[in-house]
DNA sequence: ACAAAAAGATGATTTAAATCAATTATCAGC
DNA sequence: GCTGATAATTGATTTAAATCATCTTTTTGT
């Protein structure tokens, strides 16, 4: 049986970063932990708001966050951040001290807030830590390029196929999962209208690519979805 | 007279990074310079090809590079890199050792090639240098978010207005400039067809927003273009 | 359990922009 | 200065997908 875990879609949505904090010395780790705050957010709540001052970097302990750019009523989902991700790294430059995007909880989510100045200090002090932050930023950038390409150059079928593969392969990590996202959210993610999502999903079902039973989503033919991704 | 330099469009195309190498010690700078190669590219030549191994980070000394993502005949311009930019930073993670995009010379361009392992070493050694690289990566990410939003959520008029403001404000840094880009390239940049670009430019001219005389491009009403950007 | 609200679904219509087709202008090389 | 090639322009046509309108189903709160 084909398993979407093995499939390399241009997957557009998310990748958990490695654990950046492994590179810290015991004292440095203590510094971080002593200044740490843990916060729980309910589904839908805003974790960080675009335009507000970034006093802390956000580490997702558990849950799922939606990271999106807002401008004039319109929103663009930049990525979905699962557990292990850091949010707010683009505010590390001292002259860039506000959040460049909004983050909200897709599901109940627990985060750790780490003082941004401590982050800056650790970057200066610890080369391996700095290097791991660079790695994380690079990986997010690469993933975003893929998503950017997908949303601008593919058409409806390709976009939605990509998102489905990504949900299966990178978020839920299984071919069969309970989709906690509404059609509207799926539309937002794939950059299309809700109605188009519904129609396209129906077509995928009719073609035997996926199966939807209530809230349960199942990828039947990952290869087929891949092909659709690639064709357009 | 309004000057586009003052205008803050969502400007999508490029920003020269600060000089990262200012943070190096004299010895470190010597290390870089002793291992440096200077290369000149003619207009149109490929500086780095997506998928090839990144042995060097590219520093643009002079000229203009087009950085674009390629997939199945289609291309997506990620940014235009003017002098002062670094290309290839996303290959710094050791497990990400190929170029994630192609870079070609928009005009005759001179670059310095810096061994990527020396870059990695300097990041580990010098916190301020590492920090400046993080700043650069963050700024590119922020700029790319703006471009991403522009290409996905705006329609033709808005996209093209944005590009024009960006060319005037960030690339040529004057309201009147000789456009070295063809209509086709302008289309590629704004993510639309060549014909649509031509029609839209004509409309902008008719509305007194810009003036085109031969190869000379002039922004007449930057405010007006801004408004078009914002409206959609 | 019921009403109200939200989400899902479906068909008809509109629209923005790409594509296609054909023509004119510009440029490089001989 | 002519000639083929490339770029620019213009109008007509097509198309993908959004929007609109309506209806059904599911969920939620009291």
Image (cartoon, coloured by chain):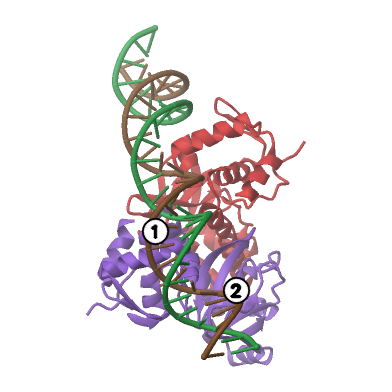
Chain colours: A purple, B red, C brown, D green
Cα separation between marks 1 and 2: 25 Å
Residue B174: x %, y % from top left:
67, 38
Quarter in which the N terminus of chain B is drawn: top right
Q: Earlier in the sequence, mark 1 or mark 2?
A: 2
Element assignment for label 2: strand
Where's residue B170, x and y in %? 63, 46
Residue located 60% across and 73% down the image? A103
For the point 46% across and 40% down, the residue is: B185
As drawn, the label of residue A103 is 2
Label 2 chain ID:
A
In the figure, is residue D22 to the left or right of A33? left
| Residue at image mark 1 | A156
Q: Is disc 1 placed on a helix, strand or loop? A: helix
Q: Quadrant of residue B19?
A: bottom right
Residue B134: numbered disc = none
Report the side of A53 relative to A151 (left or right).
Answer: right
């Amino acid at each position: 049986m084909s398993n979407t875990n093995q499939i390399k879609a241009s997957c557009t949505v998310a990748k958990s970063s490695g654990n950046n904090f492994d590179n810290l010395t015991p004292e440095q780790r203590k510094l971080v932990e002593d200044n740490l705050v843990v916060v729980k957010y309910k589904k839908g709540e805003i974790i960080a708001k675009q335009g507000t001052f970034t006093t802390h970097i956000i580490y997702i302990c558990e849950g799922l966050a939606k990271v999106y750019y807002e401008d004039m009523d319109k929103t663009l989902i930049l990525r979905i951040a699962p557990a292990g991700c850091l949010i707010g790294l683009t505010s590390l430059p001292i002259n860039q001290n506000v959040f460049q995007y909004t983050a909200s909880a897709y599901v109940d989510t627990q985060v750790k807030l780490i003082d941004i100045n401590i982050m800056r200090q650790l970057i200066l002090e610890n080369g391996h830590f700095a290097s791991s932050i660079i790695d994380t930023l690079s990986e997010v950038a690469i993933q975003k390029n893929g998503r950017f390409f997908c949303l601008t150059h593919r058409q409806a079928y390709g976009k939605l196929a990509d998102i489905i593969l990504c949900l299966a392969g990178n978020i839920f990590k299984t071919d069969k999962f309970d989709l906690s996202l509404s059609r509207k959210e799926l539309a937002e993610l794939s950059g299309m209208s809700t109605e188009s999502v519904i129609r396209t999903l129906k077509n995928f079902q009719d073609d035997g690519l996926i199966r939807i039973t209530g809230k349960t989503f199942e990828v039947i033919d990952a290869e087929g979805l891949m092909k659709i991704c690639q064709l357009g």
